[in-house]
């Protein structure tokens, strides 16, 4: 089969590799649609952090060049021993995260914090290929949901946004601030507005803000890299009561903590690349909360994420208007994102393509 294979920084090769074979508990999936995110870009431009190309992963067991792709959908073409609930031809959406199910975090439902957690497409071969083998435990059968395969591939990032929203204890009464409406920020905008909250979207790019408004934001604020928009985020006597920081930059995080109302919450979504200094008295004196979030808890979040994506199918043409062939992974996906010149927030790929096509939002 054809596959995109990561060998190291700035080294993705398009190769013919052997078709995978499903083992016990696994599904063989003919990949329909697969997306990329900032993690894929970081692996491409830097030394590998997740891809186990030089050192065997302790839980997945993978070692060597790695096929990326952890946000995907596809059709079942093989069923391993012991798998129930899937038939040949079923459309599935994959959460990609694999948990043991028996450690203390798993027992309490926090499978994203499993002590032996690993991810398809990061810690072992993923879906940037014509076929992929995936544990059935992280796949949802969506054959009866009437969701288009392109949209089913958006369930994984949507589940991350939904998990973050739940970590922040969002209610319809909240005034929500989303700082950075790129990949995850756009899903957060949609998710928060879908639950009835007012959403203020902040970004450096007007095009992203226009998209955020299409996804449900009630207000959009264009800022510059040197801007301190604190006063402009206060609507009369109202301050944001819940903020999501998605940029992974220290300045926006500090701003979000300062501007959120007393008793408010700040969910730290972006992964800060290095420690930062901050006067945390603003948290103490205002009784504010700073909350971490990581990935998604499959059983709690994934099915609801599929429903959220499918609630307004046509809106996703704003986020990912074009689906690309596999061979465009670097030129249309990784490099434009790395160089901050991508012309769509989410870039999707279809391994069956030879030319780009519009996103299919309906079955």
Image (spheres, rainbow, N blue to C red):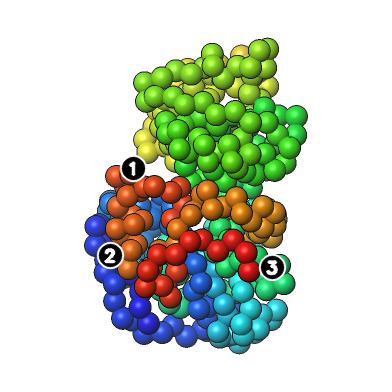
Which residue occupies the foreground of this view, 75 or 249? 75
Residue 94 visible, this angle:
no
Residue under pointer 3: 146
The residue at the point 45 percent across, 78 percent down is: 131
Which residue occupies the foreground of this view, 37 or 258? 37
Q: Is residue 61 above or below residue 263?
A: below
Which residue occupies the foreground of this view, 34 or 296? 34
Q: CA distance from mark 3 to mark 2?
A: 34 Å
Residue 115 location (% of width, % of height): 54, 58
Give the quadrant of the C terminus: bottom right
Q: Is residue 59 above or below residue 188?
A: below
Q: Secondary structure at mark 1?
A: loop
Residue 27 location (% of width, % of height): 56, 79
- Label 1 packing within 10 angstroms: few (<14), some (14-19), many (20+): few
- Looking at marks 1 and 3 on the same chain, the residue that comes earlier in the sequence is marked by 3
Residue under pointer 1: 340
Residue 313 location (% of width, % of height): 63, 56
The residue at the point 49 percent across, 53 percent down is: 320
Q: Is residue 58 above or below residue 208?
A: below
Q: CA distance from mark 2 to mark 1?
A: 19 Å
Residue 301 location (% of width, % of height): 67, 54
- Label 2 packing within 10 angstroms: few (<14), some (14-19), many (20+): many
Q: Which mark is residue 175?
A: none
Q: Secondary structure at mark 2?
A: strand
Q: Which mark is residue 12?
A: 2
Mark 2 or 1: the one toward you: 1
Q: Is residue 233 above or below residue 113?
A: above
Contact check, label 3 and label 2, Cβ < 8 Å: no
């Amino acid at each position: 089969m054809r596959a995109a294979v990561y060998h190291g920084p700035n080294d993705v090769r398009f190769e013919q590799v052997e078709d995978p074979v499903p083992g016990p508990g696994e599904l063989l999936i003919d990949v329909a649609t697969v997306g990329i995110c900032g993690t894929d870009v970081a692996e491409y431009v830097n030394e590998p952090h997740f891809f186990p190309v030089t050192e065997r992963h302790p839980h997945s067991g993978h070692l060597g060049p790695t096929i990326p792709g952890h946000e995907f959908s596809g059709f079942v073409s093989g069923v391993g021993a012991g798998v129930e609930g899937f038939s040949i031809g079923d459309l599935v959406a994959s959460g990609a995260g694999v948990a043991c199910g028996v450690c203390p975090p798993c027992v309490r439902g926090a499978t994203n914090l499993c002590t032996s957690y690993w991810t398809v497409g990061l810690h072992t071969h993923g879906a940037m290929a014509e076929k992929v083998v995936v544990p059935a435990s992280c796949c949802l059968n969506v054959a009866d949901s009437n969701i288009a395969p392109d949209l089913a591939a958006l369930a994984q990032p949507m589940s991350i946004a939904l998990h973050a929203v739940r970590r922040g204890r969002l209610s319809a009464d909240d005034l929500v601030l989303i700082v950075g409406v790129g990949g995850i920020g756009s899903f957060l905008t949609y998710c928060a507005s879908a639950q009835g909250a007012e959403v203020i979207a902040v970004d450096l790019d007007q095009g992203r803000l226009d998209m955020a408004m299409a996804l449900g934001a009630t207000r959009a604020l264009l800022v510059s890299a040197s801007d301190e928009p604190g006063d402009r985020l206060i609507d009369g006597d109202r301050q944001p009561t819940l903020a999501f920081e998605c940029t992974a930059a220290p300045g926006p995080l500090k701003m979000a903590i300062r501007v959120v109302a007393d008793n408010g919450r700040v969910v730290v979504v972006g992964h800060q690349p290095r420690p930062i200094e901050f006067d945390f008295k603003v948290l103490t004196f205002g009784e504010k909360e700073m909350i971490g979030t990581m990935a998604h808890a499959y059983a709690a979040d994934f099915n609801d994420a599929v429903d959220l994506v499918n609630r307004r199918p046509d809106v996703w043409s704003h986020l990912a208007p074009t689906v690309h062939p596999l061979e465009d992974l670097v030129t249309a996906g990784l490099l434009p994102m790395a160089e901050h010149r991508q012309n769509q927030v989410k870039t999707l790929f279809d391994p069956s393509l030879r030319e780009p096509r519009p996103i299919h939002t309906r079955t």
